């Protein structure tokens, strides 16, 4: 299920009908302050901020001013950013702007939310692979910023875990509603919750689960995907049965609940990330983003800069707003942005009376007996859009519905499913090229979805035989289906609207129909219109699901290479990712079924954890390098300070060459004749001396030159630089075109690949 759907269902709960701004005059603001101007007369930052709020002297103030300031102050931030969040009127805000130390302020904003098998698909189980090199992520702590956790889930048991909490760990298991300290263990080592922003936005709100306990399901799913323990016999009503486990099964989990049924606010997200940094996590997994937000007001950009300085890798989701270009969030240069792909797994078979088996897709949550029934294909009724017409049919048949050509709600495959369920037909066959769109809770009558290319045969059979019959087999799982992976249609595409100068997303990971732990208090399946079923494991789809796969791999890489920087880890993932699917053809784009996926959909391609362990060369970058890039882009002093929090960075070497392992050249009518020139520096992390030769594939309509095109290394950690020139020549349709630069080691095993994209700037 696409998470957009999940949250659109949440949107109809009454909480969201309440207007958030109870007092029209006050709003929550996030305020950045200049730490260098901290007045020494104050003991703590908190004292300074309280006194600052106090000095704004609201005229209507009746109660004790100090208490009043305390009430208005939501959070003090000192790690993710420097400053505070507070409830202020617009007049107070104006006054605040003139106070010494003020840097920037903006209103609180709302975040967008975006196994048994995926580890095999990623080949993690190979004997010389990353699992073994990293001891399954032992001793790494992953902080998950999400909707909480269901601590009783089998996935969070600590059997087989090292019975030791890392020394540096400062986190805690915060007591709250239906949550106490005994619920943490050597797997779930921390759990905290942050909802002052939600409450500030609506003081009358009733928080439905006032603790780190998950009552949405999202956080339980993502955290068990990152680092869930081994669970025998996990399945979703018999589908995808096997041993469930996270990508880093021995890593430890700390949950920071910032997503609430009652709202999800930047001020709470910042507080969660601030605390995760203090607590000492190694990796932050954050399956959400802020749409339409410039970098210097984006809490994830701000907090992840602080994390990056400390070597904490932040892995985030690209969003579920695809397939249109320019829809991506989290296009932030110092974190990892994950796109979502399909996996090679499907469920269920349609068996025709002539013995032909057609593997399709169904997750109907029971072993319904739909055997040897007449297969009805009737021009009058097969559009399946009229309950009235279908009701005239004998119900003891399998109705074959035509492919619905429209994506509009009134004539979509969803509408067909609804119509067929309302008529209680014994069985139904739907045709769709995009079964990923249809997810668990939606297929609630005994039915199966098949692909249009298989449908031709089925329709032919139904038309040409006198008494066509069919059966549908449920609770079957098939792996190895081809081609896989493909870019999921829903995965948001780059470039980033607010920050198009870096190619995003970075990489793709499994995101469609991922099985992971779930909460027992929300239905995860439905039979007919009234019967809802719960399951401890469920399928979810979205970049929210691909992000924790990447976070898990990052945890393994951090364990295998504790000395690597954030940039080095990201570089190793990008340069070793695969642009090919399991048929050895370029990865396809499910959003545009006739196309290959461009790097704006999949980044460098599907992550390949085992290769990422040993990338040969890396593109490293220091915090100052990112600042130089922002300076090169002419960000103002204040904008830069909101991100960096400290004056220890300078703008003395502005540069447009961020040492990123991919290339994007944007051209407009004005700049199309320009040559885009990039400089890059690679560090040899291979086995010693090595020679690499460049191999270029030009994006259509361009000429690319690299110099030098041979890089010789004589020792480990030696650095070499090269230049690459990209010249747009002509591409009639102004389309996105793409190619790559691959450094191939002479006689060695390493190939280091960087995607190259040329795109008209009009697409942003
Ligand atoms: C909140 O509750 C108070 C007291 O019951 C009431 O006066 C006020 O109108 C409520 N505000 C909103 C936004 O519902
Ligand atoms: C924690 O909660 C569980 C389940 O409600 C209960 O059995 C246990 O006694 C509680 N432990 C503490 C220390 O309060
Ligand atoms: C198709 O279905 C309609 C409506 O039930 C029925 O009137 C018609 O006879 C059917 N046609 C065939 C060929 O079965
Ligand atoms: C912050 O304060 C320091 C010390 O006064 C000053 O040098 C610096 O320019 C200030 N930064 C900004 C962005 O105002
Ligand atoms: C760019 O130039 C081409 C050819 O001169 C012209 O046809 C096109 O309309 C221009 N596009 C824009 C966006 O100005
Ligand atoms: C690089 O190494 C190759 C093979 O060892 C050698 O032939 C070549 O001369 C070297 N080039 C440079 C510039 O050092
Ligand atoms: C290529 O560009 C043309 C003109 O802008 C557009 O209509 C078409 O959809 C694009 N094709 C692809 C594959 O993006």
Image (cartoon, helix red, strand yellow):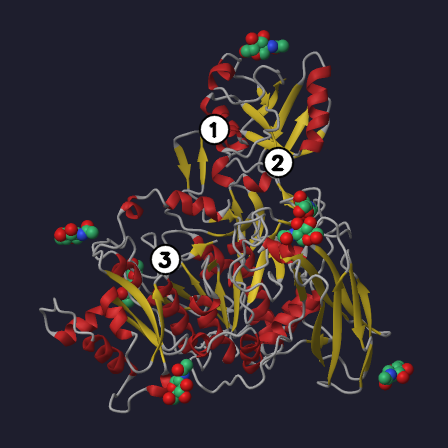
Real-space CA distance between mark 3 and mark 1, rounded to the nearest whole angstrom: 31 Å
Real-space CA distance between mark 1 and mark 2, rounded to the nearest whole angstrom: 20 Å
Q: Quadrant of residue 270?
A: bottom left
Q: Tell me if I can see residue 154 in this picture.
A: yes
In depth, the one of 153 and 685 nearer the eye is 685
Give the mark nearest the N terminus, 3 or 1: 3
Q: Which residue is mark 3?
A: 264
Give the mark nearest the N terminus, 1 or 2: 2
Q: Quadrant of residue 331?
A: bottom right
Q: Which residue is mark 2?
A: 348
Left or right: 229, with 714 as reference point: left
Measured along the vertical axis of the image, is residue 317 above or below residue 360? below
Residue 474's spot in the image, x, y percent? 58, 34
Left or right: 443, with 521 as reference point: right
Q: For mark 2, give the secondary structure.
A: loop
In depth, the one of 606 and 107 nearer the eye is 107
In depth, the one of 595 and 686 nearer the eye is 595
Give the mark nearest the N terminus, 3 or 2: 3
The structure residue drawn at horizontal position 63% and vertical position 67%, both measured from the top left corner, is: 131
């Amino acid at each position: 299920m696409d998470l957009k759907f999940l949250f659109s269902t949440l949107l109809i709960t009454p909480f969201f009908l309440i207007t958030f701004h109870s007092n029209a005059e006050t709003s929550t603001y996030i305020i950045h302050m200049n730490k260098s101007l901290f007045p020494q007369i104050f003991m703590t930052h908190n004292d300074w901020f309280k006194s600052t709020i106090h000095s704004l002297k609201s005229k209507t103030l009746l109660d004790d001013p100090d208490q009043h300031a305390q009430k208005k102050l939501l959070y003090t931030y000192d790690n993710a950013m420097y400053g505070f969040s507070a409830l202020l009127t617009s007049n107070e805000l104006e006054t605040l702007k003139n106070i010494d130390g003020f840097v920037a302020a903006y209103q609180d904003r709302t975040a967008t939310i975006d196994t048994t098998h995926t580890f095999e698909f990623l080949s993690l189980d190979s004997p010389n692979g990353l699992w073994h090199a990293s001891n399954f992520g032992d001793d790494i702590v992953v902080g998950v910023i999400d909707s909480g956790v269901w601590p009783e889930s089998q996935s969070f048991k600590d059997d087989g875990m090292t019975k030791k909490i890392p020394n540096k760990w400062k986190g805690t298991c915060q007591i709250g509603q239906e949550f106490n300290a005994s619920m943490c263990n050597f797997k779930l080592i921390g759990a905290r919750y942050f909802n002052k922003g939600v409450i500030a936005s609506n003081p009358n709100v009733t928080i439905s689960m006032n603790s780190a306990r998950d009552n949405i399901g999202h956080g339980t799913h993502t955290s068990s995907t990152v680092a869930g323990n081994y669970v025998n016999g996990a399945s979703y009503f018999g589908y995808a049965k096997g041993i469930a486990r996270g990508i880093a099964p021995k890593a430890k989990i700390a949950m920071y609940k910032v997503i609430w049924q009652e709202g999800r606010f930047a001020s709470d997200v910042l507080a969660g990330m601030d605390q995760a940094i203090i607590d000492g996590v190694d990796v932050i997994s954050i399956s959400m983003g802020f749409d339409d937000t410039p970098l210097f007001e984006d809490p994830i950009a701000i907090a992840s800069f602080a994390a990056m300085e400390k070597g904490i890798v932040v892995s985030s989701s690209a969003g579920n707003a695809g397939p249109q270009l320019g829809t991506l969030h989290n296009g932030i240069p110092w974190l990892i942005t994950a796109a979502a792909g399909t996996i090679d797994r499907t469920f269920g078979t349609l068996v025709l009376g002539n013995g032909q088996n057609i593997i399709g897709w169904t997750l109907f949550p029971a072993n319904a007996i739909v055997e040897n029934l007449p297969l009805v294909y009737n021009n009058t009724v097969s559009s399946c859009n009229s309950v009235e017409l279908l009701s005239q049919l004998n119900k003891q048949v399998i109705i074959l519905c035509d492919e619905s050509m429209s994506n509009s709600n009134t004539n979509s495959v969803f509408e067909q499913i609804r119509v067929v369920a309302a008529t209680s037909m014994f069985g139904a066959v739907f045709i769709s090229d995009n079964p990923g769109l249809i997810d668990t809770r939606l297929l609630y009558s005994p039915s199966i979805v098949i692909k249009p290319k298989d449908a031709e045969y089925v329709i032919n059979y139904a038309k040409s035989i006198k008494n066509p019959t069919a059966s549908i087999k449920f609770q079957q799982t098939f792996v190895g289906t081809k081609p896989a992976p493909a870019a999921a249609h829903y995965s948001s595409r780059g470039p980033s609207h607010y920050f198009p100068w870096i190619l995003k997303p970075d990489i793709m990971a499994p995101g469609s129909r991922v099985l992971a732990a779930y909460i027992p208090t929300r239905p995860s399946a439905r039979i007919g219109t009234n019967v809802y079923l719960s399951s401890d494991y469920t399928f979810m789809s979205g970049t929210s699901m691909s992000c924790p796969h990447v976070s898990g791999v990052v945890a393994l890489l951090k364990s295998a290479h504790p000395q690597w920087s954030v940039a080095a880890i990201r570089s190793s993932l990008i340069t070793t990712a695969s642009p090919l699917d399991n048929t050895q053809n370029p990865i396809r784009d499910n959003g545009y079924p006739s196309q290959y996926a461009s790097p704006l959909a999949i980044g460098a391609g599907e992550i390949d954890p085992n290769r990422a362990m040993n990338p040969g060369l890396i593109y490293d970058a220091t915090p100052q390098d990112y600042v130089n890039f922002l300076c090169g882009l002419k960000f103002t002093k204040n904008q830069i300070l909101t991100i960096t929090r400290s004056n220890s960075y300078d703008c003395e070497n502005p540069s447009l060459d961020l040492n990123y392992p991919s290339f994007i050249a944007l051209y407009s009518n004005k700049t199309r004749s320009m040559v885009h020139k990039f400089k890059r520096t690679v560090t040899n992390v291979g086995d010693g001396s090595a020679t690499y030769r460049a191999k270029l594939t030009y994006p259509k309509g361009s000429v690319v030159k690299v110099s030098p095109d041979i890089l010789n290394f004589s020792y480990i950690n030696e650095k070499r630089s090269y230049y690459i020139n990209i010249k747009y020549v002509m591409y009639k349709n102004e389309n996105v075109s793409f190619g790559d630069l691959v450094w191939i080691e002479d006689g060695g095993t390493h190939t280091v690949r960087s995607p190259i994209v040329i795109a008209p700037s009009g697409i942003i």
